[in-house]
Amino acid sequence: MKRLGIAAAVVALGVGFSGTAFAQAGNPEAGEDVFKKCRACHDVGPDAKNKVGPQLNGIIGRKSGTVDAFNYSDANKNAAVVWDDEQLFKYLADPRAFMPGNKMAFAGLKDEQDRKDVIAYIKKFK
C-alpha cells in the first residue's frame, strides 16, 4: 500500500510539472523535421515573417493573438491563452477543438512525440 502512495505522488508530481516534462521529452532536431508540416503557414528563426499564420519566434510566454501586424481571428485574440509547453501541446493536437473559431485550418499533430519535438524546436527561437 505504501508503494501505491509513493507511485501516486510521483505521478502527481509529473502532472504538476508537465511543462518541464514536455521540454525534457522533446527533441528539437526531430522537431525541425516535424515543423516542415507547419512551414507552409508559419515561419520561425532569425528571419521569420508572418505568413498565412503568425511567425512563432518567442511564442512561449506570449499571450495568444498578440503578434504585431498579424490579423488574428477574434477567437484567438480573445482567448487569453498564455502559450506554454502544455497549452501548445493541447493546441497542436487539435487547434479547432482547443480554440473554436480560430482560423487555423491545420488538422493537428496526433502523435504526442511529434508535438513534444516540434515544441522543443520552436522553443529554440526566442
Image (cartoon, rainbow, N blue to C red):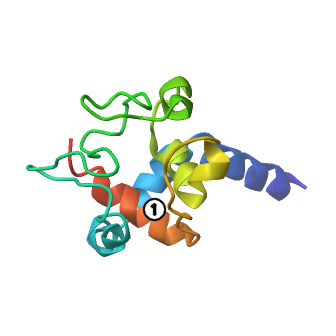
Indicate the position of residue 81 as horizontal and vertical percent values. 52, 30
**Label 1 residue SS:** helix
Residue located 70% across and 45% down the image: 12
Indicate the position of residue 43 as horizontal and vertical percent values. 23, 54
Which image quarter holds the C terminus? top left
Q: Quadrant of residue 59?
A: top left
Packing grade of label 1 (10 A; few <14, some 14-19, many >=20) is many
Q: Seen in the image, is 92 located left or right of residue 9?
A: left
Indicate the position of residue 56 as horizontal and vertical percent values. 29, 46
Question: 110 above or below 13?
Answer: below
Which image quarter holds the N terminus? bottom right
Q: Which residue in the structure is indicated by mark 1?
A: 116
Residue located 20% across and 48% down the image: 125
Q: Residue furthest left?
A: 47
Observer-nearest residue: 56 or 22?
56
Indicate the position of residue 118 as horizontal and vertical percent values. 38, 62
Circle 1: residue type: Lys
Question: 69 above or below 4?
Answer: above
Residue located 30% across and 55% down the image: 42
Question: 59 above or below 11?
Answer: above
